[in-house]
Image (cartoon, grey):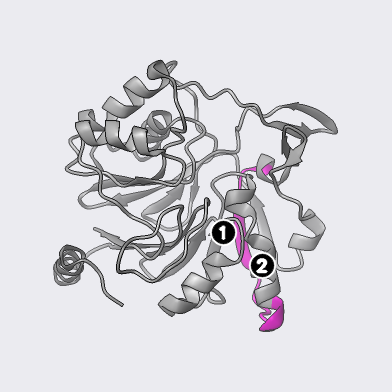
Amino acid sequence: MCYPITDFIRYIELLFKGGTMMKVTVLVDNDTLVGINFQGEPALSFYVEEGDKKILFDTGFSDLFLKNAQILGIDLTDLDAIVFSHGHDDHMGGLYHLMEYYKARQVEKKVDLILHPNALCPKCLNGKNMGNVLSPELLEGYFNIIPVSGSYALTPHLTFLGQIPRVLEFENTHSKVVTKLNGDWEEDKLLDDTSLVFDGEEGLVILSGCAHAGICNTVEAAKAITGKSKIQDIVGGFHLLHPTEERMDKPVSYPSQLGLSHIPPCHCTDFPSRCRIHQAVPVRPIGSGSVLEYR
């Protein structure tokens, strides 16, 4: 397959420099790119390689992440961990298909399944299910379930952020989704929303699923947990879908304060929001099949 020449040059530079590297392959995104023969869906799934560890971050909505992984030659039976950004079906829906994939191939290894405890709770929007439908008992037949509320080290350089504090008032994180906690339905405050942070030599890289907690809150959490302030990149969903002007203003201008040369928002970041972000920091388009490398 072909990658943009700039990505290839970047990859060679990183190889010769040595040191810690992280490679992120976009298995599923809303978008696809011209010249790259992959399908997309309104969902997200990243395959992350850091050191000798192989981590699946979200599984998209369907089995599409498996199909794209096969085209790329990525073996998803050899994972060290599966990590979920939150419990919505456009990020967890593919888990059933992964279980079927493992069953058909008689995979005996139980992979660690790392997520916030609330991610497995039922969730509904306007009476329609949009959360996990798999019971913990069923999941335990295939995975080692590790519910984590706080930060959790996946590798010495890659961290699951855990529950993200809502410290910035301008990021409205209210939801119309309801969830069932302790037997009762209530407003889903999306406390299960989280991200990953890579602590690289050139700065922090945040991998976001949807950023329901707010992309700025997420970056601030990553800085607090690592004790570092230099941001190398922010990749993933910014949850800017038809935002009000007030809701859009500060999250859009925030990346320009971080000294980023470019930024690749995707998934739940609509076109007008990307255009506004591009006015502050050049947007780098990514989609299913994109490969990003960081040091």
The image quarter containing residue 134 is bottom right
Q: Quick check: 101 left or right of 85?
A: right
User: Is 102 in front, or is 270?
Assistant: 270
The amino acid marked with disc number 1 is Thr
Where in the figure is residue 20, as x and y percent of width and height? Answer: 27, 62
Q: Quick check: 44 left or right of 37?
A: right
State the residue position of label 1: 59
Q: Residues within 10 Å of mark 2 (few under 14, many from 20)?
A: some
Q: Residue at x 42, y 20 (%)?
A: 247
Q: Compare marks 2 and 1 and give the one earlier in the sequence.
A: 1
Where in the figure is residue 47, as x and y percent of width and height? Answer: 44, 63
Q: Quick check: 213 left or right of 252?
A: right
Q: Residues within 10 Å of mark 1 (few under 14, many from 20)?
A: many
Instruction: Name above or below for residue 158 compared with residue 188.
Output: below
Where in the figure is residue 238, as x and y percent of width and height? Answer: 42, 37
Give the extent of the magenta segment.
Answer: 103-117
Instruction: Name above or below for residue 256 compared with residue 12.
Output: above
Q: Residue at x 19, y 71 (%)?
A: 15
Secondary structure type for disc 2: helix
State the residue position of label 2: 97
Cα–Cα span, label 2 and label 1: 9 Å
The image quarter containing residue 99 is bottom right
Secondary structure type for disc 1: loop
Where in the figure is residue 28, as x and y percent of width and height? Answer: 47, 60
